[in-house]
Image (cartoon, helix red, strand yellow):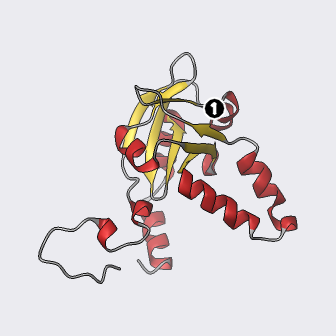
Amino acid sequence: MCNIVSSKPMNISDCCTEWWYIMLIGTYQHNIDSKGRVIIPAKFREELGEVFYATKGKDNTIMVLSKESWIKLGESIASKPSATTVKLKRFFFSSAVELIPDKQGRVLLSQTLRDYAGIDKDVVINGAGSQVEIWDAAKWAEYNEQLSDDDVYDTMGALEL
């Protein structure tokens, strides 16, 4: 929570040391081109930086992280006993790719990641707090159809939000 009182408009970065955490928001629809490239929305590129990383994510999505978040993930996994993290290391790091957008904001998603996420052509790119998720558009629609208000409210209650 921000403890700064000001009569002037403030940026979130003025009061939160991890301001980037809540800045990846919004939903965008794009297509994968014939070479396996997708445009990452400009707002996300601004927040992710010039170089960012993609790997397998939850619910058969592609998870995209800034360099800082990628390093934090790696450090967090490395700080745990090896016997408990070997599956995580294999899951996240074996399929990971470094992404550098071209002049049009496109990045090449590896075939491995596209296969994992079931992505062929139409995608939805979501901001999800500290990460971006790339979904197959049909799977995103199905996920939203199955998600009920009660599920959301129950989770909010459990987290005391």
Q: What residue is at 20 percent from the left and 82 percent from the top?
A: 5
User: Farthest residue toward the left?
Assistant: 7
Left/right placement of residue 59 relative to residue 160 reads: right
> Residue 48: horizontal and vertical position, in percent?
46, 48
> Residue 85: horizontal and vertical position, in percent?
80, 63
User: Farthest residue toward the front?
Assistant: 50
Q: What residue is at 30 percent from the left and 66 percent from the top?
A: 12
Left/right placement of residue 115 relative to residue 11 reads: right
Left/right placement of residue 43 relative to residue 78 reads: left
Q: Which residue is mark 1?
A: 114
Q: Quadrant of the C terminus?
A: bottom left
Foreground pick, 16 / 95:
16
Disc 1 element: helix
Occupied quadrant, residue 54? top right
Residue 49's place in the image compared with 30, above or below, is: below
Left/right placement of residue 11 relative to residue 122 reads: left
Q: What residue is at 49 percent from the left and 28 percent from the top?
A: 38
User: Farthest residue toward the top?
Assistant: 34
Q: Quadrant of the N terminus?
A: bottom left
Would residue 62 be seen by someone viewing this image from the given angle? no
Q: What residue is at 88 percent from the left and 66 percent from the top?
A: 83
The count of marks equals: 1
User: Farthest residue toward the right?
Assistant: 83
Would residue 12 be seen by someone viewing this image from the given angle? yes
- Circle 1 Cα neighbour tier, 10 Å, few/some/many (<14 / 14–19 / ≥20): many
> Residue 88: horizontal and vertical position, in percent?
76, 57
The amino acid type of the residue labelled 1 equals: Arg
